[in-house]
Amino acid sequence: MTPTIHPEPACVAVACGCTLGEEIIWDARDASLLWVDIENPAIWRHWTQTGETKRLGLDEKLSFALPTTDPDVVVAGFRSGVAALNLADGTCRPIVRPDDFPEGNRLNSGNIGPDGSLYFGSMDDAEEAETGSYHRFDGTRLATFGGLAAVTNGPVASPDGRRLYTIDTAEGIVRTHTYEGGEIGPAEPLIRFEDGWGKPDGLTLDAEGHLWICHYGASRITRFRPDGSIERVLPIPTALVTKCAFGGPDLTTLYVTTCQRGRDPAIDPMAGHLFRVETPFKGLPARLYEWPLP
């Protein structure tokens, strides 16, 4: 069965040309977007009401930067571990680092769950060895779950907070976990990417509980129903689609990061830019990490 094609086109929101753009997030406090470039290390910010864009270059790879209750501080997933980075003065305070963290690993996707905990993944920076995993930090204790993977994405929680979704990008599998009473259940396969689909990369959920999953290497995002079936496909005019998030005043605009790593600009001139797409669906507001820690 041919899936529905999303009728609205994806347009360039910011021509940032990131080497590996990732982890876009909407901050409703000042109508801004926050994302990172992992391989040309930087935090990007764009204020949609004024059109202003800023890039903060960094000396160390980072994979996510999440807003906190202090507007000047983000929780950042550096190669060396999670830290609180003050955007105003550049100071950095370590928070947590996974135990038995192999030398070749780095952190990957991160977000704040309904319980206020920080959920993030780790991975092999060479994207080969299965040394990465999924983690939950509640401000005191770090828990690891979901098994090992070479490249992780997620974890992301369902709107009701009773389910977590994780992605094994290298194996092309999206898994689901129950989450009840603070306990994370074992991984159960939900979606297996087929040949020609590329690899499942970053994901977000909308208010209806549908999954929007980026296809790295296949120029699209798919909206999957909670049962894993395809609801629609959203074409993106560049090959390496990495992460998406809802934003805008009514949370119906989907913003999308992309990657220009290894792409020929003569063939793929929009690789690495930030895109936006209008949708009839409402996203979930981004949660703020409580800072300072209690």
Image (cartoon, grey):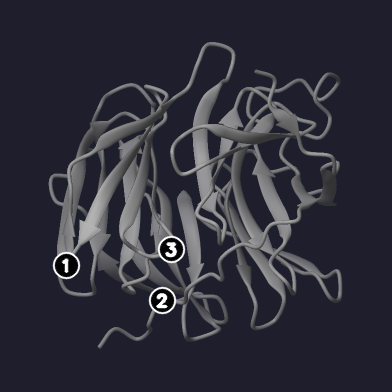
* Left or right of 90, for residue 234: right
Q: Residues within 10 Å of mark 3 (few under 14, many from 20)?
A: many
Find the distance from the CA under tag 1 to the CA under tag 3: 27 Å
User: Where does label 1 land, which residue?
Assistant: 181
Find the distance from the CA under tag 1 to the CA under tag 2: 21 Å
Comparing labels 1 and 3, the label whose residue is closer to the camera: 1
Task: Residue at 65%, 18% (x, y): give it.
Answer: 1
User: Where does label 3 land, which residue?
Assistant: 76
Q: Amino acid at mark 1?
A: Gly
Q: Name which quarter of the figure residue 120 lies in.
A: bottom left
Which of the two residues, 78 or 33, is positioned nearer the viewer here?
A: 33
Q: Amino acid at mark 3?
A: Ala
Task: Residue at 29%, 83% (x, y): give it.
Answer: 293
Numbered tag placed on residue 84 in the rendering: none
Which mark sits nearer the N-terminus, 1 or 2? 1
Residue 73 locus on image (x, y percent): 49, 79
Q: Is residue 167 above or below residue 290?
A: above
Numbered tag placed on residue 289 in the rendering: 2
Which mark sits nearer the N-terminus, 1 or 3? 3
Task: Residue at 75%, 44% (x, y): give it.
Answer: 273
Q: Residues within 10 Å of mark 1 (few under 14, many from 20)?
A: few
Residue 57 locus on image (x, y percent): 61, 58
